[in-house]
């Protein structure tokens, strides 16, 4: 554990998948964790699963900056000394080609994956700069770098996350705040279920013949970034299932 990471860690999208597992892993390492998402029941069960772990459920929609700020004002004392942020909340919606895409789905992805991430960053980053140390890990995607059919707006929102990470590193040089991006490939979480609007059969078909990444694989990568010594900044980690072959096109056609 590095010096600055002894404080609390804010993990967004902690009600499921990567975020839930990351919250557990970081709490097991001894960090108080502020677990952010919209589904209160999921956060409550994460927080109460192991009473030894310090996980505080913070129910908020990352798209609503005012509600987020208000909820953070009400944090108990031991969760207020935030030293790191994992910007993980995000989603994909639909897999239509761009020419027949649905604007409301595009907006939901942009509002969540781009503006939502900026809302949380805007809230937490000034605290990190003020303490002269801190770390932000942004969860990107290989969809940012490698196109696939129907990935259009989703991939572009993740390309924003990748480029923002590098630009944040540039701006934050000399402040003691580090910024990393973890870019996973196909992983079995609720991601595909959300993308296909609750169609479980279609979501499951995505993983036919593939051993996907697990939420733990990604959580370990996030933990590794956060636990590097202060002189090391991990800019970017790409992590893919061995079974996922970019040269054969993307398996996301579901
Ligand atoms: P899940 O669907 O399992 O988890 C997504 C999380 O984001 C949930 O906790 C959800 O919580 C939260 N979330 C979504 N919208 C909002 C919102 N408006 N406000 C607050 N929280 C929100 O998917 P993953 O764990 O797989 O996804 C996590 C991240 O990883 C995403 O950014 C995704 O794009 C990215 N990713 C996923 C990959 C995969 O194959 N699974 C691969 C590469 C990247 P709730 O609904 O309760 O608000
Ligand atoms: C999600 C990765 O491969 O399902 O970001 O598009 S993939």
Image (tube, rainbow, N blue to C red):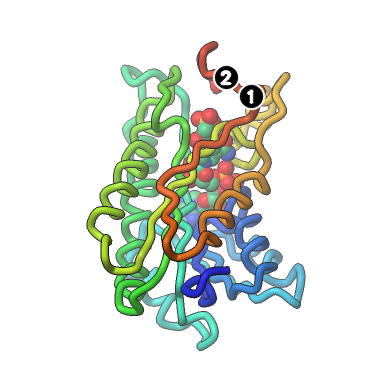
Residue 37 in sight in this render: no
SS at badge 2: helix
- Is the residue 17 above or below the residue 86 in the image? above
- Is the residue 74 above or below the residue 188 in the image? below
**What residue do we see at 45% from left, 75% from top?**
82
Tag 2–tag 1 contact (CB < 8 Å): yes
Q: Nearer the viewer, residue 50 or 171?
A: 171
**What residue do we see at 31% from left, 17% from top?**
99
Q: Residues within 10 Å of mark 2 (few under 14, many from 20)?
A: some
Q: Nearer the viewer, residue 139 or 108?
A: 139
x and y, in percent, of residue 44 in the image:
66, 68
- Is the residue 70 above or below the residue 120 in the image? below
x and y, in percent, of residue 65 in the image:
33, 65
x and y, in percent, of residue 108 in the image:
38, 43
Identify the image quadrant of the C terminus: top right
Q: Which residue is mark 2?
A: 251
Q: Is mark 1 within 8 Å of ligand 2?
A: yes
Q: Quadrant of residue 192?
A: top right
Q: Which residue is mark 1?
A: 206
């Amino acid at each position: 554990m590095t010096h600055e990471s002894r404080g609390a860690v804010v993990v967004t999208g902690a009600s499921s998948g990567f975020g839930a597992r990351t919250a557990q892993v970081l709490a097991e390492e001894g960090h108080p964790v502020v677990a952010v998402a919209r589904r209160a029941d999921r956060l409550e069960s994460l927080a109460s699963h192991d009473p030894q772990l310090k996980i505080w459920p913070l129910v908020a929609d990352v798209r609503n900056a005012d509600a987020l700020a208000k909820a953070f004002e009400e944090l108990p004392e031991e969760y207020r000394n935030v030293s790191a942020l994992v910007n993980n909340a995000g989603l994909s919606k639909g897999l239509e080609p761009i020419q027949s895409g649905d604007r409301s789905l595009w907006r939901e992805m942009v509002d969540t994956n781009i503006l939502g991430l900026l809302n949380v960053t805007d809230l937490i980053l000034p605290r990190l700069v003020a303490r002269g140390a801190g770390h932000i890990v942004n969860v990107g995607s290989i969809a940012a770098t490698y196109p696939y059919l129907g990935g259009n707006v989703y991939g572009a929102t993740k390309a924003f996350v990748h480029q923002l990470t590098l630009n944040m590193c540039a701006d934050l040089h000399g402040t003691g705040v580090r910024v990393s991006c973890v870019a996973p490939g196909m992983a079995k979480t609720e991601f595909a279920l959300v993308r296909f609007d609750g169609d479980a059969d279609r979501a499951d078909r995505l993983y036919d013949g593939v051993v996907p990444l697990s939420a733990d694989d990604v959580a370990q990568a996030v933990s590794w970034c956060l636990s590097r010594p202060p002189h090391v900044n991990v800019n970017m980690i790409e992590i893919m299932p061995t079974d996922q072959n970019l040269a054969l096109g993307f398996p996301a056609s579901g």
